[in-house]
Image (cartoon, coloured by chain):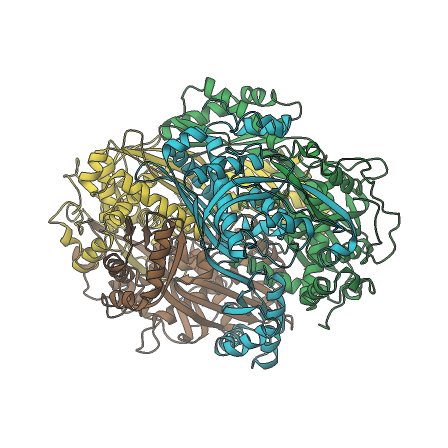
Chain colours: A green, B cyan, C brown, D yellow
Amino acid sequence: MERIRHLPAAAAEPPSRTVTLAPPHGEPLDDPATYERNVENFIGTVRVPVGIAGPLAVNGSAARGTYYVPLATTEAALVASYSRGAQLLTRAGGCTARVLDARMRRAPVFRFADLREATAGALWVRENGERLRAAAEATSRHARLLEIGTLIEGNHLYLDCAYATGEAAGQNMVTFATEALCAELLAHAPVRPRSFAVESNASGDKKAAAQSLLATRGRRVCADAIVPAALLEERLRVTPAMLAAYWRTGAVAAAMTGTIGMQGMYANALAAFYLATGQDVACVAESAVGITRLDVAPDGALYASVTMPNVVVATVGGGTGLPTQRAAAKLLSRGDEAPSADALAEIVAGIVLAGEISLTASLCAHEFACAHRRFARDGANAATSRVHLTGVPA
Amino acid sequence: MERIRHLPAAAAEPPSRTVTLAPPHGEPLDDPATYERNVENFIGTVRVPVGIAGPLAVNGSAARGTYYVPLATTEAALVASYSRGAQLLTRAGGCTARVLDARMRRAPVFRFADLREATAGALWVRENGERLRAAAEATSRHARLLEIGTLIEGNHLYLDCAYATGEAAGQNMVTFATEALCAELLAHAPVRPRSFAVESNASGDKKAAAQSLLATRGRRVCADAIVPAALLEERLRVTPAMLAAYWRTGAVAAAMTGTIGMQGMYANALAAFYLATGQDVACVAESAVGITRLDVAPDGALYASVTMPNVVVATVGGGTGLPTQRAAAKLLSRGDEAPSADALAEIVAGIVLAGEISLTASLCAHEFACAHRRFARDGANAATSRVHLTGVPA
Amino acid sequence: MERIRHLPAAAAEPPSRTVTLAPPHGEPLDDPATYERNVENFIGTVRVPVGIAGPLAVNGSAARGTYYVPLATTEAALVASYSRGAQLLTRAGGCTARVLDARMRRAPVFRFADLREATAGALWVRENGERLRAAAEATSRHARLLEIGTLIEGNHLYLDCAYATGEAAGQNMVTFATEALCAELLAHAPVRPRSFAVESNASGDKKAAAQSLLATRGRRVCADAIVPAALLEERLRVTPAMLAAYWRTGAVAAAMTGTIGMQGMYANALAAFYLATGQDVACVAESAVGITRLDVAPDGALYASVTMPNVVVATVGGGTGLPTQRAAAKLLSRGDEAPSADALAEIVAGIVLAGEISLTASLCAHEFACAHRRFARDGANAATSRVHLTGVPA
Amino acid sequence: MERIRHLPAAAAEPPSRTVTLAPPHGEPLDDPATYERNVENFIGTVRVPVGIAGPLAVNGSAARGTYYVPLATTEAALVASYSRGAQLLTRAGGCTARVLDARMRRAPVFRFADLREATAGALWVRENGERLRAAAEATSRHARLLEIGTLIEGNHLYLDCAYATGEAAGQNMVTFATEALCAELLAHAPVRPRSFAVESNASGDKKAAAQSLLATRGRRVCADAIVPAALLEERLRVTPAMLAAYWRTGAVAAAMTGTIGMQGMYANALAAFYLATGQDVACVAESAVGITRLDVAPDGALYASVTMPNVVVATVGGGTGLPTQRAAAKLLSRGDEAPSADALAEIVAGIVLAGEISLTASLCAHEFACAHRRFARDGANAATSRVHLTGVPA
C-alpha cells in the first residue's frame, strides 16, 4: 500500500488532516519468508483493494477522536455507504462507544462413565480453581484465567474457561493454557474421564450461537448516537420515524427466521475491517452477531445503537504484523500512539453503527438498489460528482 | 501472484501435475482503475498470503478430479490442516459432492394498515405470480424467479423471492429484480401498503439464521466420504470410534449453546477460499453454517459428511475478475475449462469436509495445540521435515 | 362441571347472554370406562378449576361473535388478566382473526449407505409423489397429503409430510398415513435404506423450534386490533407509546436470550384453554411460540397483533369428547352450532392477544406484582369489589 | 380421586406395594371456595383422568426408591409408554438422578437516555449488590438472592436476578422481591432511568429460549442409566446400536430445524406430571427443553441420559394444595414423608428418561403407530392381555 492515491470520493468535506499511508518501503511484499508464520504451502499473495470510510468521530473510552477507517473489500458501494454513515455521525457530534467486557474462551469436554462421575469431576473443578488457574497461567505471560464454568450433560462435563489475553486475540493462547488446565485435571482429579478434548465446540469459536449474545467472546462493545431529525432528513432523506418503523419490520424478520441477533449487516464492515488490519477474517462468522436499535428519541431525534458481543480484534499476532496490514492499521493511530485492541473494538462498533444507519436509510428511501447499481456498473468515479449517493425519490 | 514459489510443505506426495499460477503479467496491480468497480475511496491494496491445500479428489456432479485448493489466510496451521485432510480423502478414493439446490433470495416487506389488508395483499401476490415474475425477470438476462413465498405477521407482509442467478452470486441481481417486482405490486395491488422496503432482513443476507439450514441461499451442497479405519489410524492416529464419540460431544455442545448448525469449523476454509478466489468474504457470516457428521460405518470405517446450505460462490462479478483472484481461481481449472459456480461449491464442500476430519482428529489425538504452536512459532518450514503435523501421543 | 356458580367477577358489563354450562347429567365422571380411550392404568381424575374470560368480540373468518372463553388453571390472576384484556378489545370493537394455514406434519427419516443413495432416494420421492399420496391417503377418510418436502443431510434423507386433517388435530392420523407412505417407499424405491423411522424429530412435534415460525404445524393464526388511546388509558392506565416502548425492550430481550419467537406469555392462555376444552395440553410446548407486536398506529392508537403458527386444536379426538371438556367447549357455540377447529384457533388468537395487552400494560403500569399478590393471597373475591385489577400508581 | 380402581394394565409385575390414593373425603371438590386462590370467574371444574406409570426406581440425591408416577392426560398410549420405559429402567437397576442447580429468575429492564447512562446504572448495580439484596430479601422469608447479572444493550440495562425460593416454584415470590429491588435502584441510583419494568421478557418465563439450556430456571436436573443390551432386546425389541443410530438422526433433525435442545418428547411427561400434581402446566413451554442422549456404552450396553435445565416444580403454592392434586402427589411419599421439590424434579427426570427410551424404541421397532392405534381405538383394556405394547415386526 502506498501513498493515498486520491481523495475519498464520498467524503463530505476535505479530510481535516492529510491521510497518508506509510509505504512499506523495501519490505519484501511477496517473499515467502514474510508470511512464514502465517501460511503454509505459500504460492503468492492475493491483493484486496482498500478504501477509507470517514471521517468517523468516536467518543469511546479507548478510542477518542476522528478516524478514517480502512476497509478492504471487492464489493462496490460498501465503502461509500459506510462513509456516508460515518459522516452523518460525525456531523451529529460523533458516536459514544464502550468496551464492556473482554475475554477469550476455550471449552474442553470430559467424557466420564456416567452422571455420578461427571458430577464428581465438576465438584473437583469447583474446589480446585486455584490449582487449575496456576496450571493454565503458567503457559503464558499474558493469559489470565478469569473464570471456569462447569456444565454437565449426562456423563459429559463441559468447562467454559474464560481468559483475559491482553492485546492478542488469544485464540492460540487460550488453547495452550486450557491444554495445561486439562492436564492438571487428568493428573489429579479423583475420577478419570474416558476421554477428553481441549475444545468441545461449546466455546462458539467462529460460529454463530445464541450463547454468543449472552457470553462475551473477544470484546463486547456498544456504540450509540443521537442524530437530529433535520440532519438525518437533509443527509439521508429519511425521518427517524421511518427508520424506527423499518426497524420493527426487521426485528420481526429476525425473530421469524431464527436469526442469531437482530442486526442489519454487520458482516460487511467486519470482514472489510478485519481484512484491512490483519485480524482473523474467519471470525466474522461469530462477530457478525449483535443487536441494532433504531428508535425515535423523546425529542424526535433518531436514537441508534449497536451491541456487539463478539468482536475479535488484536494489535499483535495473526496477520496484524504483516506489512500492508500494519500500514492500514496505522491509519488509526493518534499521533505516534497506535490504537489498542479496545480502541479497535470501539472504532469497529462506530463504523458498524454508521453502516446500519446508512443501510437502513437507503432501504427506507428506496435507494438501496440504485446505489449498488451505480457503483457496481459505473465505478467509484460515478460518485465523485456528488457527495452523497444519489437516490431515486422515496 | 506469480509462479509457485516452493512445493507444498505438507503434501504427502509430489503433486501429480505441476501447479502453476498464471502470473498476471503487466496488470496494474495497485492502480485505482483496476479496482474502480470494487471499492470507493481507494488508497491501495492489502496483500494476503495464499497457500494451497491438496491434492483433493472430488467426485462431484460438476467438479470431477483432483484439485489443489488456494486458501488465503494469515492464520498459521490452517493450510497445513486442510492439506492433510485433503490428502486423507484423496487416499480414501476422494469425496462425493453434490449441489442439491441453488437460489439467491430477497425478502421485501410491506406494511399495511392492518391484518385484513395484509391478507388481501398476500392473496393478490399469490394470484399474480406471473405478472410479478415478468416484472422481475425483465431486469436481467440471467435472473429467473423460482418462487415467491408469502408470510404474514400482523399487518406486515413479507415476501420470500427466490431466483436462479446463473454463474453470478446474484446479490445485486436479485435486488434489482425484486425492486421491479415491488414496483409492480405497488402499481397494481388493490390495497396500498403504507410503506415497503426491498429487503426486510428476512432473506438471511450475511447473517446466521436457523432458517438458513432449511432454505437454501446460494448453493446447498453436500459432500461425504468413507475412510477405511486403517488409513485413518495410520495418517491421523485416531480411530473412527474416537471421532464418532467426539462428534457426539460436539453435537451436544452445539445444541446447548444454541449454535446455528452442528459443525466444527467451516469459517476457516470458507474465508480463505472466498478471499483467494474473489468471492464476497462477508458471506462467511451465513455460509459458515451446516451439519457435519462423523459416524462409524457398518464395516468399521469412518463415515464423514458435511451439509452446507448457504455457499455463496460465483465465477463472475464481485472480486472474481480481479487479477490475483482470477489467477488463484484458475488453479481449479481442468485443462482450459474454468470451474463453474457449481464446481466451486462442490470443491468448497470437499475442502470443508477435509478440514472437519483433520480438525476433529487433532482434537481427539490431542495434537491441536501442538500444531498451532509449531506453525505459529516456528513457521511453515517447521513442517517440511515431516509430512504430517507431529503430535503429542494421545 | 355444573351450572355456572357465580357471575364472572371481572366482567366489565353483565354478559349479554346468560352463560350456562350444560351439566353432564348422569355421565359417570369418575368411571374408568369413561376414560378408557384416553388413559391407561387409570386411578381417578384430577379436577382443575375453570374460570371464564370475556366478553371477547372476535371478527374472524370462522369465529364471529362475542365469546366467554373457558380457561382451566390453578394460577391466581390469570383469568382476571385475560378477562380485562378481552373486555378492552371488545370495547374497541373486537379483534380481527384469520386462520392462514392448517396442516399437521410428520417427518420420517431414511438412513442410506451414502450421499449418492440418499440423493437417489430423494429423486424417487419427487418423481413418485402421486403413488406416495395414494398410499398415505388410503389410511384415513380425513387425511389429505398436501406436500412432501425432501431434505438431505449426508446419507440421511428426511421427508416433511404435511397433511390436512379436518376437524382432528391429526397427530395419530398423520402417523398412520406416513407409516403407509414409508412402506410404499421401502417396497418400491430402487435404493433400499439401511433403516428408517416414521418420525425423525424434525416435525417439531411438541417442541419449540425456529422452524415452527416459518412452517405451520396445526393452525397458523393471526389476530390484531386497534385500540383508541383514550380507551387504553382509561381502562389500563397506560398509553400506546408506553406499550410500544416496552415492546422494544421485550423484542430485544427475546433476541438476546435466543427465544423462539417474540412474545410475552402465550403459554398461560394456551394451557388453560387446551385443558378446559380437551385439547392436548402437551402441545403448549410448540404452540406457545409466536410474534406479538405493540405499535403506535398513525393516528396515535395502539396497534396490537399476535401471530401464532402452531395452534393445535380440534373438535374431535383426544380429550375433546370427555364430559366436562365437552361442556366447557360448548360455551363457545353460537346457537346450536359448535365451533369448528378454525373457530377455536381464531378464539385462541383473540384471547392470547387480549392477554398480551393486559400483561404488558400491567408491567408498564407497575401493577404486575400487585395483581398477583392480591389474587394469590386474598383470592378471587378480592377483585369483586372492582371491575379492573387495581394497581399501584405508575 | 378415590381408591385405585384397577391394577395398572401395563405393569410388568405386580406392584411391590399396594398403591393407594388417599381419597379426599368430605372435601368440597366443586365448591368455588376451594379454588378461590387459584382462579377467578369460577364456573366449575374440568376432570382429567390420571394413570400411573411405574414402577420407576430412582437413585437420586433427594428421591431414593421406587415410585408409581401419577400422570394426568387424555392422550391414549401415553401412560403405557412411560410405564414400559419405567419398568425397563427399574429392571436395569434404576436410573441415577441429580438436581444440579435451583433458581428462579426475574429480569427487569431499565431504559436510560443513552449508553453512557446505562453503563453508569450497571456500575451502580455492581457496586450496590448488598443493598439490593437486602431490599429484595425483605419481601419474603423464603427468597434468597443468589446473583444479579447485568446486560447492556444500547440505552437498555437488563438485570438477571436469580433467587433460591425453597419449596415454592417462586414465580410470584421473585416478582415481589425484584419489584423491591427495582424500587431501591430507582430511589438511590445516581442516574434515573426513563422507564422500567419488573420483567423484560429476558427471564425465559414460560418460553423456550436458547438461554434456558445454559441458565437454570427452576431446577436443572439430570438422569442417566445403563441398560444391558439383552434386557433392552428382550423388553423393547431393539438393540443399543439401533437407538444410537436413531439418536444421530434425531440430533441432526433438531439442529436442522432450529430446535431448542435435542430431545424427543419431554412435553408429554411434563404436562401430565405437572397437571396431576398441581404444578403450573403452562411451564411446559419452558420445561420441555433439554438434551437426550442414547449411546452405546463401552461394554455394548445402552447409555441413556436426559438433561433438563428448567424443571419448575413445587410442593407449596399454586395448585399443589388442591384436593385431588394433593392426593396424586401423595403417591410419591416415602412412608409419611412427602417428597421435596428436589425429589419431584428427580422423579420427573426419571420418568422423562423412561419415556425417551420407550418412544425411541417404538420408533426403531416400527411400533409407534401401532401402539397409538391400539390404545386410541381399542382403549386401555386392549393392553391388559399383554404386558408389553405389541408391535409389528421390525
* Residue D56, percent from left and from top: 25, 38
* Residue lying at 46% horizontally and 73% vertically, measured from the top left: C57
Q: Is residue B343 visible in the rendered structure shown here?
A: yes
Quarter of the image where the C terminus of chain C is located: bottom right
Q: Quadrant of residue B196?
A: bottom right
Query: Residue C123, how many percent across, how many down?
Result: 36, 60
Image quadrant assignment for residue C162 = bottom left
Screen quadrant of the N terminus of chain C: bottom left
Q: Is residue B180 above or below residue A304?
A: below
Coordinates of residue A205 in the picture (x, y in percent): 56, 39
Instruction: Answer whether residue D141 is visible to the viewer in this image.
Output: no
| Residue placed most toward the observer, C384 or D327 | D327
A152 in relation to A131, above or below = below
Taking depth in this image into account, of B264 and A76 the one nearest to the observer is A76
Left or right, residue B180 beside residue C162: right
- In this view, the residue in front, A108 or B271, is B271
Total marks in image: 0
A112 with respect to A220 (left or right): left
Rendering coords of residue B247 (x, y %): 42, 38
Q: Is residue A264 above or below residue A35?
A: below
Residue placed furthest toward the top:
A188
